[in-house]
Amino acid sequence: MNDTPSAKCACQHCGLHLEFPGELDGSTIECPTCQQTTLLSIPAAAEPSEELTPAAIASALSSRVPKTPVSFLYQFGLLFVTLAMVLLPVLYLALIAAAGYGVYYWGTHFSSLLTSGVGGARIFLLKAALYIAPFLAGVVVVLFMVKPLFARRPKHAQPLALNPGAEPLLFTYITQICESVGAPAPRRIDLDCQLNASASFRRGAWSLLGNDLVLTIGLPLVAGLNTRQFAGVIAHEFGHFTQGFGMRLTYVIRSVNAWFARVVYERDAWDVSLEEWAEEAQDGRVAIVIAFIRFSVWCSRLVLKLLMYLGHGIGCFMLRQMEYDADSYQIKLVGSEGFEATSKRLHVLGSLLDRTYKDLRPSWNMSHKLPDNFPAWLMRHDAELRANQRTHLEDTLGLEASGLFDTHPSWGDRIRRARQANESGVFHLEQPATKLFACFEVPAKQVTILHYTDDLGIPAPMINLVPVSHAASADANFQESPPPTPTAPRIRVKLSTPPPS
């Protein structure tokens, strides 16, 4: 066994991370990736950083940031958009009523097609088809339009709720940030495995009348940011809640948009049955009736899609303005430079996330192996990102423009606003955000398992968890493992970036 201590450095040309015995410090080697000669050197030890304590956090966040003024015209516009969004579901109900009345009118005023005795049997069958097909299609369309009103909301993954007594430093940190921006503190903090953080009403519409908030923190976000960057993200989320009236109107706008998206895109057993009937129909006349029904359902969904885009276009303009408002609190807390650095960091992590899921597929397909710590797995990919690739991602951050149906402004527009504000910020404490947790690895592994089972739908007994340190040599490690036996249960799992909740 070799007890020689090892060291790490990066290739001076391509940025590849290299691990070498400490005794080789100062020597040169040929980089295995770019084939260039690079110097092996042990980085100088960093000066010990200030220990994170509740007192240190309270001192660093002792200053209050000024409230961002909101014009009367802005509030009036937000109220107008909210009323317009509320009218869209009313219009949807009116369409259902109109469709129902159309079915009733056809059934009562065209029944003569069945009672008329003119013509022979073939003529009667033709008239019966002309009467029954539109009537049946109308009934199905009405049922498909009514169905979303009673459809259950999709089940989301259950986040991991934190005990304030177990993580006092994190709760102090969050509470101090809320006091700095003038927002109510959350009553609960949840953890999940998304590259995101969000503050929301804890019980949905039932919490609109109070300040019953919940903060959901994605641990990959914590793993990838420092305390200053993470504070800016939290300030942004709670900056929304500094305007109680505006945030409640925004909740209505987002809820209506989400509901229309469900109505248009959600599929259930009814849709599957209709498709199966169309495929299995042997009689040509039955196939024609089913095709007519499917066309009618498609037309009804087309109308709903137009309503959805109308509502999305109306609401997204105001949502983008709300994001600018929330950005202002982040900029005032961590400064314009801190906002830009955080934006670049989030862009890099977001780009790495797809690659992270892509690298999970070979190990899962061959041996059902998955890393036991997803945030650490993402950070491993971040550490292996070459310097030129990182620079390219950061330089291309502001190239995309804001779209009509974007709920958030483009990064370029947001960074330009931050530079124009030219704020120095009041919070400059920079340490790994993972230090806010007593032992970050424990909740990280817990949310990883919840992510696999709840978000990705993988049965827990099938998962073979391996330490991230072992997964570092994933290709060799996983190829050595035999594939599952033919008698083992096999499922298809989509290992990709899950949609935002």
Image: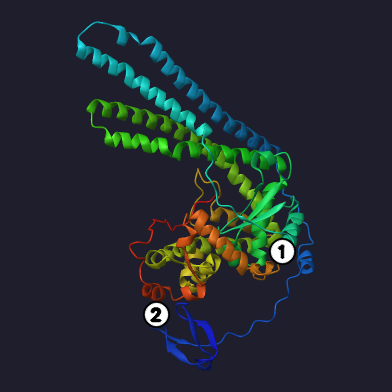
Q: Amino acid at mark 2?
A: Cys
Q: Quadrant of residue 248?
A: top right
Does residue 266 appear to the left or right of 64 in the view shown? left
SS at badge 1: loop
Residue 181 bears which disc, if any?
Answer: none
- Nearer to us in this view, 4 or 56: 4
The foreground one among 296 and 127 is 127
Q: Which residue is mark 2?
A: 34
- Label 1 sits on what residue type? Ala
Q: Is residue 260 left or right of residue 339?
A: left
Residue at 40% x, 11% y is 108
Residue under the point 68% across and 58% down: 162
**x%, y% of residue 269?**
41, 38
Quick one: label 1, few (<14), some, or many (20+) residues within 10 Å? few
Q: Is residue 29 left or right of residue 337?
A: left
Q: Residue at x 55, y 30 (%)?
A: 89
Kindly identify which residue carries mark 1: 166
Q: Nearer the viewer, residue 459 or 398?
A: 459
**Residue 395 percent coordinates (x, y):** 50, 64
